Amino acid sequence: MTSPAANLEAALAVAGALGHALMVVDADGVVRVADERAAELSGLPSDWSSQREWAAAWKGCIDAQGEVLPPDRWPMLRCLRNGERIERMLVGRPRPEGTRWLTITCLPVADVDRPGRRVALILLDDVTRQRNDERRLQQAQALLASAFDASPQAMVVGGREGRVVEANAAFERFATGRDKGDAQPWWSFIDPDDWPALFARIDEVQTDPSAVLDLECRGTDVHGEAVAVRLFGAPVADPSRGGRPPHLAVQISDITELRRSEARYRTLAETVPVGIFEIDRAGLLADVTPLTEMILAGGSPVIGRPADSFVHPSQRSLVRLHFARALEGHSSSAEFKLVHADGRDMVALACFRPLIGPSGSVESVIGTVLDLTEQLQLQDRLRELGRDIELLAAEQSRERLEAQLAQTQRFEALGRLAGGVAHDFNNLLGVISNYAGFLAKRPDLPDTLRPDVDQIAEAARRGAALTRQLLLFSRREQLRPQRIDLGQLLGELAAMMTGPLRPKVELHLEAPPGIFVVADPGQIEQMLINLLINARDALPDGGDITMSVRLGTVEADGAVPDGDTGGPTEAVVEVTDTGIGMTPEVLARIFEPFFTTKPRSEASGLGMATVQGIVEQAGGRVQVTSSPGSGTTVTIRLPAG
């Protein structure tokens, strides 16, 4: 038979193996035995074996609600006095570093040393960490519940059957029932015609954990007003549902004003007498207005097709050049020969501008297209009429001749008035820009709508670039002068134009840095591109193009002598080709607006007129020398800055 001491030692070993601290206290308050952990948890001093009264260590202990426990509720006394069996009672011992929480189990055991009396076998477990974790979890749950209910976005947790599990205050705009188990389905505000699509998406989400609910629906709010909403949700795990499908947490966003705004802007864009398009980064048409479809394909669908597929094969590389520049953040415009769906050739003026996204990178390219075909055909008819008048003049009287010449001059003036189209187009763009500005300043404009307003304003600004080609030769373009390093600009342009040149055309550059002028950078770049395109077209079988820039000195007669005479300096830009050259008759009309030796379907005759307008607006002069078979040299002199 084992001794009581041996039994206690065995009990200590078992308790320790199970992770419990153990102590034994008799009815007189004497600590019979305690392991090291029990002494530490009970607050006994290091010499506890000499202390006979352990009660002092438990004064001030608290219950789970934070109330101080009176002695008659101490688990040890209840066990010793009443013989109660106490199972895992939660007790807190306040300490300077924080309350230590314990679970106490007290078992009444007969005192083998003193028959008729009992001792308390006490098991102690430190649950401070679990207690603190539970409190933090409760606080986090309370915080989430508060945020859920305070959110301005309507939120509801429910299932396909429609029962409302949870809903926040904002949800009351769509449904009055927020109580759990409300008989009204949470989706009852949605238009019944949209229920089949909603149920199909809910079924998919409940069976596929990776799926999400993302659906636009029509509906009616609690005031009977028609609304457009977007539902975005995901399944919510709920172990209590067993094998049944999970609930859904759904966020309901009111997009009524967004859709109305989109409709207004779409109507506005379709009203403007110019086609508007968007090209994605892959070069495919992502969005177009009906007028764009009419210009490009006679009204047939064009979305998803390559943007350059509507351009004549000879000019597709030029389209890709402008598109690449837009992806790099630059705006540009040019005339292009289009191939219509019915096979006829067209000429259009197109503008390309980058669309900057929230991250600051170019997301796509926005542009406009203006059909110039009828305008150019009218100009051709006017010229033919002028030639007919000249032939008739030799056979008719002087008065008849003067009358017909006067009529010809009126027709020529009408041709020049075509530049006024650009001014009217700018007015239309101004209306769009102003309305976009008014909307952007409205304090009640939703944040989700503001990027759309910004895009409309940006598109209006891009459209303004469409008019530059017409405004330049009519000298209505507003200048934005800057100090430009011509050597650097020619170098960048030469690198950019390598692709659009013909395979057998070699471009040579003589452009030292440090030669500056004060001019509009966009106009100077447009001028140089026009000259390079003309030089390239003069080399059908290949050849050389040389671009150079140097400093010269201005003399009284405007000549540029060799060497420095101490007079004012000017920058001299020359573009020379080894092409077919021009006859004196063609050279005499080189700066005439709408005059061109190319087929009318390929050019409008604005190239050199635009160059002259740019140079003269910058305070410079332009001179062209050429003869058949000897190539052409264009010399531009600008005040050095």
Image (cartoon, rainbow, N blue to C red):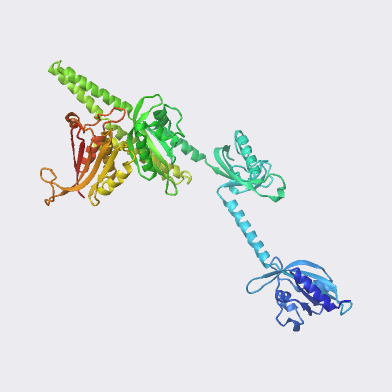
Task: Give residue 140's quadrant in the image.
Answer: bottom right
From this viewpoint, is residue 73 visible?
A: no
The N terminus sits in image quarter? bottom right
Of the pair 420 and 337, the residue shown nearer to us? 337
Of the pair 375 and 334, the residue shown nearer to us? 334
Q: Would residue 22 appear left or right of 463 to someone viewing this image?
A: right
Residue farthest toward the bottom in the current orientation of the protein: 50
Of the pair 246 and 517, the residue shown nearer to us? 517
Q: Would residue 355 appear left or right of 125 to someone viewing this image?
A: left
Residue, x 81% and y 74% (percent of image)? 10
From the top left corner, tell me how far across and down residue 316 is, in percent: 37, 34
Residue, x 35% and y 44% (percent of image)? 330
Task: Give residue 466's quadrant in the image.
Answer: top left
From the top left corner, tell me how far across and down residue 425 is, in percent: 33, 34
Is 386 situated above or below 612?
A: above
From the top left corner, tell me how far across and down residue 3 is, in percent: 86, 78
